[in-house]
Amino acid sequence: MEMLNYYITNNVELIVLVLCGITLLMLILLIINSIRIKKWKNKYYQFMNSKEDFNIEDVLQNNIKDIDGLKNILHKQKLDIREMEKHVRQSIEKVAVVKYNAFDNMGGQLSFVLALLNQTDSGVLLNGMHSREGCYMYVKEIKDGKSEKVLSEEEKSALEKAVKQ
């Protein structure tokens, strides 16, 4: 105990200096915290005074209603997209044309084969044959890139071009 008393009496200046330093540090921290609290209070009052008769519970309930409404809209849009995808799969997206001479004695490559296919390579081949007497059109059905009817070289070529797209 005597040693402690001796140490305190001989080092009073050092102890006072350390206590002053701690006090100064506490004062600085107090000022910093006061500034932060003031900023938060200003933000809080600005938020609370942004509307007259502001009630946080009403705001939350309105937000929940809005979110539920958006969920319903999203669900409807997903159903609409599925329906559109069904239609898109059946729409024509692959087209190829091959022009040729149907008869050796006629020039100009006026005859043609037109391939019209959807995503699943199903559709039709239109064969337009031009002769001196007139133009004749033939249609052949295509399912999964194949025909039940025998195809000419020009029809095969148009079908291959369309399938490769």
Image: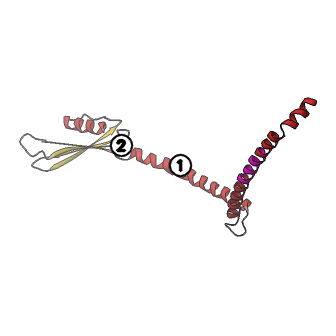
Q: Look at the numbered disc 2 and give the secondary structure of its residue.
A: loop
Question: Magenta stretch: dominant SS?
Answer: helix
The quadrant in which residue 63 appears is bottom right
Which one is in front, 119 or 51?
A: 51
Q: Which residues are magenta?
A: 22-32
- x and y percentages locating residue 43 in the rendered image: 68, 60
Residue shown at 78% from the left, 46% from the top: 20
Q: Which scheme is used to colour this image of the protein?
A: secondary structure
Ranked by sequence position, the earlier of labels 1 and 2 is 1
- Residue 115's label in the rendered image is none
Q: Quadrant of the N terminus?
A: top right
In contact (CB < 8 Å): disc 1 and disc 2:
no
Which of the numbered marks, if any, corresponds to residue 118? Answer: 2
User: Which residue occupies 90% across, 29% down?
Assistant: 3
Percent of width and height locating residue 58: 72, 62
Q: Judge whether 96 appears above or below 77 on screen.
A: above
- In which quarter of the view is residue 150 placed? top left
Q: Nearer the viewer, residue 11 or 46?
A: 11
* Quadrant of the snapshot with the C terminus: top left
Residue 25 shown left or right of residue 10 in the figure:
left
Mark 1 highlights which residue? 78
Element at label 1:
helix
